[in-house]
Image: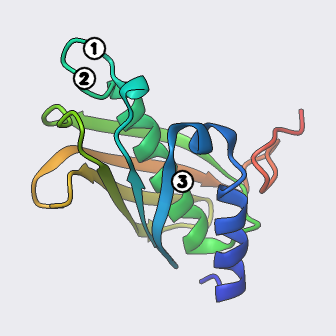
Amino acid sequence: MPETADLNQLAEMFSKIPHCREMGINITALEAGRTSMRLDYHERLAGNPETGVVHGGVISTLLDTVAGLTAMSAVSATTPVATLDLRIDYLKPARPGDAIYADADCFRLSRSVAFVRATAHHGDNADPIAHCIATFMLNAAGFTSGGQGTG
């Protein structure tokens, strides 16, 4: 499991991801194998300007991000990961104007794969907007811990 220094390095690395900054995704909790994030509502994230409902792609980005960071936190901040599979069940639309929270936990690690489950919600994890199961390749060839491909 990563040490506190690794988690600080991981949080610092996350803070430099341009699309997360642009969308307004923030870490609210980070520990080995568990991560929580918050995404404040912005009209620019709406999929339908008439209703203001957040686009499903925004929810998928939030879930992939929280799950990926959770996979990294379960092993080491310097271990590059790549999404192998991301299965999302959209259960209901996000409420316009409300923040969206995401919680994830790594429930299994093999030598080469991390298995993570995550939920997006409006503050009550028992009343989800979406749920996902994700798998991540550990030590992904062609990727560095900074997220930039090498080839």
Give the residue number, with chain letter if any, for mark 3.
68
Element type where label 2 sits in the image? loop
Q: Residue at x 46, y 54 (%)?
A: 66
Give the residue number, with chain letter if any, for mark 1.
48
- Among the two numbered marks 3 and 1 on one chain, the one whose residue lies closer to the N terminus: 1
Whole-percent x and y of residue 10?
67, 67
Vertical comparison of 65 with 5: above or below: above
Element type where label 3 sits in the image? helix
Q: Mark 2 and 1 residues: CB-CB less than 8 Å, in contact?
A: yes
Whole-percent x and y of residue 36?
40, 65
As drawn, the residue found furthest toward the right would be 151
Q: Crowding at label 2, few (<14), some or many (≥20) Cα neighbours within 10 Å? A: some
Q: Residue at x 43, y 44 (%)?
A: 62
Q: Nearer the viewer, mark 3 or mark 1?
A: 1
Q: CA distance from mark 3 to mark 1?
A: 28 Å
Q: Nearer the viewer, mark 2 or mark 3?
A: 2
- Residue type at the position of mark 3: Gly
Query: Dividing the picture into quarters, in which one does residue 55 lie?
Result: top left
Give the residue number, with chain letter if any, for mark 2.
52
Whole-percent x and y of residue 16?
72, 52
Q: CA distance from mark 2 to mark 3?
A: 27 Å
Q: Crowding at label 3, few (<14), some or many (≥20) Cα neighbours within 10 Å? A: many
